[in-house]
Amino acid sequence: MKRLFLIAAAVFLTAAGDAPAPVTVYSGGPIVTMEGEGPATVEAVAVRDGHILAVGDLATVTKSAGKRALRVDLKGRAMLPGFIDAHGHLGFVGQNATMAQLQPPPVGGVASIAQLQDALRSFARQQSVPVLVGNGYDDSQLAERRHPTRADLDAVSETVPILVLHVSGHFASMNSAMLKLIGYGAETPDPIGGVIRREGDGKTPNGVIEETAMYPLLKLLAPPNLEASIAPLVTAAKIYASYGITTGQDGRVMPESWAALDEAAQRNLLPIDVVSLVSFERDWPETVRARIGKSYSGRLRIAGIKLTLDGSPQGRTAWLKDPLPIPPDGQKEGYSGYPAIDLNLFNAKLSDAAKNNWQVFVHVNGDAAAQALIDGVRANGLAGLRTIAIHNQVVQLDQLKEMKTLDIQPSFFANHTFYWGDWHRDVALGAKRADFISPQATAWSLGLKPTAHNDSPVVPPDIMRLLWSSVNRRTQSGDILGPLERISAYRALQQVTINAAWQIGEDASKGSIKVGKRADMVVLDSNPLSVDPSNLHAVKVVATIKDGATVFGKLD
């Protein structure tokens, strides 16, 4: 009897081990596969073990799924591939959630320096902190049309150090206590690639700093320990999932923040995949360099290196060929921005990447910066290696043609047309350059494979608002900025699905609903290919599915 019992147990365990994973079939709404150059919808998709098992008509998919499959009725709602964040800063999205919120409408409610001061005072009353940090103020949207200064922040507190970060991430302003804390005074020189703005005497810092002058803040902003660093990352990943994003990006990881990101991944705390880009202006240990371009480890991979060539167009530090219509405070007529990195160092870093066959991602906003990238790719053996030009706001037609030849692919910050279109037209760029900002239609016509992104937390990681901007290019005043650069809703969707997967070399497993690919999907309350294009931003995310598991929302 004992022998028979052991045999029966062995048979049971073998059967259980060999049993196929459960299958889920989704049907009852339009399923947009994003396969091919035109819209294609199917009736059903089956998922098993985190991958797509079958796609097609309901009868065929049901047969493939088997009789025991779980059936999910979409109830008329649309299913698409999970959205892919082509560029953003997931780590800072999490940190931002812990700071005083200073964003202007429509994201927040700070429209004047007085309201900024009130927001800081309110935040300080709610929690006691040794340093008061706020994020998201926007000089272009404040009534005063200027940055808050040391004097403005001293009015909030002369004793507690105060730091407020510009919405672009390229500027900050500090009160006197904060300037003292980081050691900035009248004798402190401007760093290469940055500016410490001065008062009327030309020496005393007025509190506003630009670009690389912000580097001393990195250690100050870092959470106090590993556990405190991990929590904001998990928060950020959940925020991304709520917008239908199944692959996020941490697009400029510093050595100080790498350990927390890696630990969060190893503990399986991330609900979505995260693609990281290591900031290559900094030095990295061989243990990290060895992971560049390799596969995922716990939902985290290092896709490549990140370099930053210039600054912000709305902040007027983008490196342009021609002068700005209206220069910023402290600059004279003829000012055209500046590079944020020494070009010899930039080219040395490109050469290092080429020798290691690493993919390169470069922040370029101005056309002078775009040209430096083109020249660097050509000179350092990177042609044909799918370099990604991040933002690419003021690129010119001849430069796009060169990019096509060299396989430099653009990722456009397409939401600029909405958030800063009027400012670009009237102040930062002028009408001609503003009309050609983020030239998506031209890029498509040249045979490039562009993507679009939100650069969060610069703006929220709202993919539907991004699609709306790509299709409509409407500013906050209602103007249409560059009507010839509008693209179709399908093209806009390609930019956040299959093209975004292709740019990071993951299109074999992501970006479309196809047999064998990862079961990364988003369910929307309406089909973005059927709604009025002017209402795309109103389409809501119902559920986000990552590797077959629902990580946001639910399907009743």
Image (cartoon, rainbow, N blue to C red):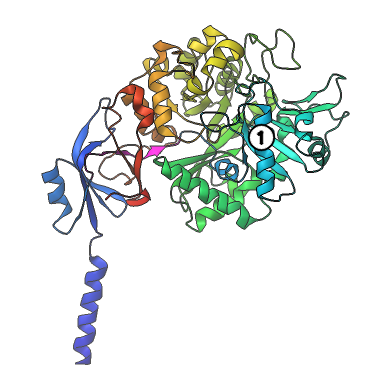
Q: Which residues are magenta?
A: 74-85
Using the rendered image of the protein, determine whether residue 509 is visible from the camera's viewpoint: no
Identify which amino acid the numbered label 1 is placed on.
Glu
Identify the residue under disc 1. Answer: 281
**Who is closer to the viewer here, 151 or 488?**
151
**Splitting the image into 4 quarters, where does residue 34 fall?**
top left
Decide: is 288 above or below 444: below
Q: Percent position (x, y) of residue 494?
A: 35, 29
Image x and y of residue 442, in percent? 41, 14
Q: Nearer the viewer, residue 175 or 91?
A: 175
Q: Which quadrant is the N terminus positioned in?
A: bottom left
Residue 315: in sight, yes or no? yes
Q: Nearer the viewer, residue 261 or 210?
A: 210
Residue sitting at x 86%, y 26%: 204
Classify mark 1: helix, strand or loop.
loop
Looking at the image, residue 398 lies above or below residue 416: above
Q: Is residue 139 left or right of residue 409?
A: right
